[in-house]
């Protein structure tokens, strides 16, 4: 018997824990934590450990499939790729290269390879849900201080503020070690979350905010900190712009007014703001989805940046760092790959959404799906005819599923790359089977702070699954693209050039890091903003029609903005809190994971449920102005009686599950945040009713 144990990183979620992949006779037999990994320190979760069940799953697609009269039939790679190439070329010839869109969901490492393909093909339209996942943080913080507020230095922190963020479920491998370190050393913990997560319950201050009112609370934090003179005078004087106007702007946001808006206690708000303002250093963890799924997401994320700035925590040890991936311009979203940055200006400017979200011409993020749909539906500003989706279950992932399904079904050509059949692949003409992360080489630098990691192939792919980089290389050859990589090692070596090493060298080391830097702006002499200072009042944005200061806006659905709607839909619904055993809509077919969390559960206050005659664990109907789904009630006395929470991603194993269980049947895809294009899926209205048996 041959045995090996390969050091790699897990790609089942964004944390990318360090693992050993154990292989016997060419088959995967286990995944174990790597105690020497600098972020995860040996941690693994049930998803990562379930790799065996995923790759040998009887439902895994292992051959290219083409849809014919009687449904999908197996075909050769050559025929499948030929059909895709033919349709991409036909769309380009008839409607222009921009009529072809490639999309991905959480990226799964694919962004550089997809972007380079699109750049050479001629389309600026790389679609991803960044507008609801990280993009608003990048836009809000980069517009304010010149870098993304994504690297909290928890382990060195004296105060940890988790804003709409429950890393124990969502980023356990990446952040929990450092958070535990910080807390062990005595850091204070503040949590702003409508749910009583475990971290919220053990926090020094837990603010159970009304969903969608975060900007009001942030402006109040800033107001209290300025009023009580807790801000960092030296930093504010030397490194910021517009402090006096900010001070005046936030003055109406008193704890009393904010308590009314946010359904909180004024004294508790004042205490939390005071704790944050008076404890240094302090770090902020903003939920990558939690603060990115609101129609005022830009004002929310820039307010978080302002809070960090005026308290002197930007780029401070124990504050929020400005980490550069060692791969720099060749990192996952680096400008060397972006289709937008690498196309001639005229073609790049056709990128969908730029007319509606002009800041995205300066701080590019991928095309929000919600600007691609209208182009498919109406042919304006130009038609989109052919779409390729890599690792993305659009129908279940994106708000207003009914519309998403209709839009994708109306395309001339859709191809999907996925391990399994999903409500999205069902609509495709061609489905391609990808290799699993244990079956492929790659590098990872997205959100990895100052590190780049090697993901190392531990076994051959289950026949005939194929590494997606190789799929793109093969497709590039069929389409006749000049200049695409010819081999996977060539692509990986290219990405690692800024680190002056090859993939083979990185593989031998496991990872590579550049030194952490603090207060980089001192050395550089400025922040990378128009005034060279942190833009507390960003006058330059007014040229793009954006307010210079962040404003609180009531969520479009709720007790203040739509009281009459609340007569019919009397509860507030927030969606998508993470569950450690699932990644979005994935893993529902993995037996060991499904056993742990078989059904979607609606967190609801017991008094609210009882008043409706609903028992704990009873199946109920949950409706919004857009539709109705089925879900189990889960009594949760920590919830506000008027607020409920539903997870997302359930669909598998139930007839028409995409309709009956999928929460995005209820969510709204308008109005979007006017700057980031973020979707309002954390603050909606809903009704709960008995379903009966
Ligand atoms: N209501 C609500 N909806 C949400 C959210 C929310 O909070 N609330 N969160 C949103 C966010 S932040 C995001 S990022 C999106 C994510 O949305 P998606 O990225 O679409 O989510 P997944 O379900 O993880 O992945 C889709 C598919 O990828 C396949 N897959 C997994 N690994 C690979 C791989 O390596 N290669 C290929 N080709 N396929 C693979 C899986 O089998 C799965 O079918 O969902 C969003 N949807
Ligand atoms: N296990 C697992 N991990 C994941 C994912 C997954 O699907 N499964 N998805 C990954 C992806 S792509 C992303 S983008 C990230 C998301 O990462 P995060 O955004 O950190 O997601 P959560 O940890 O669920 O934290 C969101 C928290 O916001 C709270 N919340 C809801 N509405 C509001 C509100 O209006 N205001 C405030 N202040 N809080 C609110 C929720 O109760 C929840 O606890 O997670 C990543 N990690
Ligand atoms: S948290 Fe779990 S799924 Fe995510 S990388 Fe770590 S082991 Fe893999
Ligand atoms: Mo996300």
Image: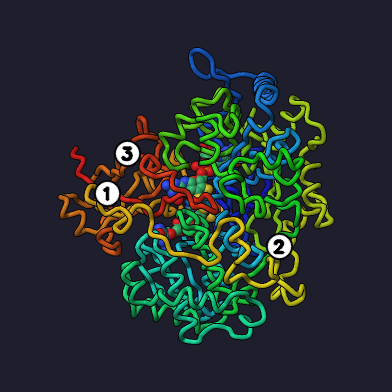
Does label 1 point to a residue whose CB lies under 8 Å from ligand 2? no
Residue 627 is marked as 3
Q: Nearer the viewer, residue 580 or 26?
A: 580
Vertical order, 638 against 220 (above or below): above
Task: State the residue lying farthest toward the top.
Answer: 69
Regarding mark 2 in the picture, which secondary structure is present there? loop
Mark 2 crowdedness (10 Å alpha carbons): few <14, some 14-19, many ≥20: many
Residue shown at 39% from the left, 49% from the top = 647
Instruction: Identify the residue under disc 2.
Output: 324
- Quadrant of the rendered image containing residue 689: top left
Query: Within 10 Å of the Cα at label 3, are there few (<14), some (14-19), or many (20+) other Cα atoms?
Result: some
Could you tell me which residue is drawn at 71 percent across and 50 percent down? 443
Do callouts 2 and 1 mark residues in contact (Cβ within 8 Å)? no
Locate residue 59 relative to residue 613 in the image: left or right.
Answer: right
- The percent position of residue 244, horizontal first and vertical second, equals 55, 79
- Seen in the image, is 585 located left or right of residue 419? left
Q: Is residue 310 above or below residue 77?
A: below
Image height check: is 164 above or below 614?
below
Give the number of the disc on residue 565: 1
Locate residue 418 relative to residue 631 in the image: left or right. Answer: right
């Amino acid at each position: 018997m041959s045995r090996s144990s390969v050091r790699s990183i897990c790609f089942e979620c964004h944390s990318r824990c360090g693992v050993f992949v154990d292989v016997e006779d060419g088959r995967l037999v286990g995944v174990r934590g790597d105690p020497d990994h600098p972020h995860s320190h040996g941690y693994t979760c049930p998803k990562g450990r379930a790799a065996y069940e995923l790759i040998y799953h009887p439902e895994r697609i292992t051959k290219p499939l083409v849809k014919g009269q009687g449904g999908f039939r197996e075909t050769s790679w050559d025929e499948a790729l030929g059909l895709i190439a033919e349709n991409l070329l036909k769309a380009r010839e008839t409607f222009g290269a921009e009529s072809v869109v490639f999309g991905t969901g959480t990226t799964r490492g694919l962004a550089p390879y997809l972007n380079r393909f699109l750049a050479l093909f001629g389309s600026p339209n790389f679609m991803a849900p960044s507008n609801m996942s990280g993009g608003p943080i990048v836009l809000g913080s980069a517009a304010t201080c010149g870098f993304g507020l994504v690297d909290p230095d928890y382990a060195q922190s004296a105060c940890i503020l988790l804003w709409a963020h429950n890393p124990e479920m969502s980023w356990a491998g990446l952040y929990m070690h450092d958070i535990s370190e910080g807390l062990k050393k005595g850091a204070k913990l503040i949590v702003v979350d409508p749910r009583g997560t475990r971290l919220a319950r053990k926090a020094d201050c837990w603010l159970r905010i009304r969903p969608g009112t975060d900007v009001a609370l942030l402006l109040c934090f800033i107001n209290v900190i300025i009023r009580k003179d807790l801000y960092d005078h030296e930093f504010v004087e030397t490194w910021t712009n517009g402090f006096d106007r900010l001070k005046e702007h936030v003055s109406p946001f008193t704890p009393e007014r904010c308590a009314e808006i946010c359904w909180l206690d004024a004294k508790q708000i004042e205490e939390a703001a005071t704790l944050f303002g008076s404890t240094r250093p302090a770090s902020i963890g903003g939920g990558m989805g939690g603060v990115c799924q609101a129609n005022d997401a830009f004002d929310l994320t820039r307010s978080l940046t302002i809070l960090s700035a005026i308290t002197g925590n930007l780029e401070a040890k124990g504050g929020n760092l400005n980490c550069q991936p060692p791969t720099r311009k060749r990192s996952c979203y680096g400008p060397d790959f972006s289709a937008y940055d690498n196309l001639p200006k005229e073609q790049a400017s056709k990128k969908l959404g730029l007319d509606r979200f002009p800041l995205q011409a300066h701080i590019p993020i991928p095309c929000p799906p919600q600007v691609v749909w209208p182009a498919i539906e109406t042919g304006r500003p130009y038609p989109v005819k052919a779409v390729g989706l890599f690792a993305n279950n659009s129908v279940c992932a994106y708000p207003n599923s009914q519309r998403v399904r209709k839009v994708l079904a109306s395309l001339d050509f859709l191809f999907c790359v996925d391990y399994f059949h999903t409500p999205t692949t069902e609509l495709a003409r061609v489905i391609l089977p990808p290799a699993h992360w244990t079956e492929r080489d790659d590098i990872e630098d997205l959100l990895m702070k100052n590190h780049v990691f090697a993901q190392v192939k531990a076994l051959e792919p289950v026949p005939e699954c194929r590494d997606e980089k190789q799929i793109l290389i093969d497709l590039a050859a069929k389409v006749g693209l000049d200049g695409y990589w010819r081999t996977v090692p060539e692509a990986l070596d290219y990405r690692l050039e800024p680190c002056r090493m090859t993939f083979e060298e990185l593989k031998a080391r496991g990872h590579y890091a550049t030194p952490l830097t603090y207060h980089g702006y001192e050395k550089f002499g400025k922040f990378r903003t128009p005034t060279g200072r942190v833009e507390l009042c960003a006058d330059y944005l007014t040229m793009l029609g954006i307010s210079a200061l962040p404003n609180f806006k009531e969520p479009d659905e709720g007790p203040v903005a739509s009281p009459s709607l609340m007569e019919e839909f009397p509860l507030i619904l927030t969606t998508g809190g993470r569950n450690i055993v699932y990644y979005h809509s994935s893993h529902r077919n993995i037996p060991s994971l499904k056993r742990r969390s078989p059904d979607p559960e609606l967190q609801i206050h017991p008094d609210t449920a009882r008043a409706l005659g609903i028992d704990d664990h009873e199946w109920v109907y949950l409706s919004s102005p857009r539709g109705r789904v089925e879900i189990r009630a889960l009594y949760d006395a920590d919830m506000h009686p008027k607020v409920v929470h539903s997870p997302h991603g359930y669909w598998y194993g139930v007839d028409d599950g995409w309709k009956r269980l999928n929460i995005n049947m209820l969510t709204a895809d308008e109005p979007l945040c006017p700057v980031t294009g973020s979707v309002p899926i954390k603050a909606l209205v809903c009704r709960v009713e008995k379903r009966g048996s």
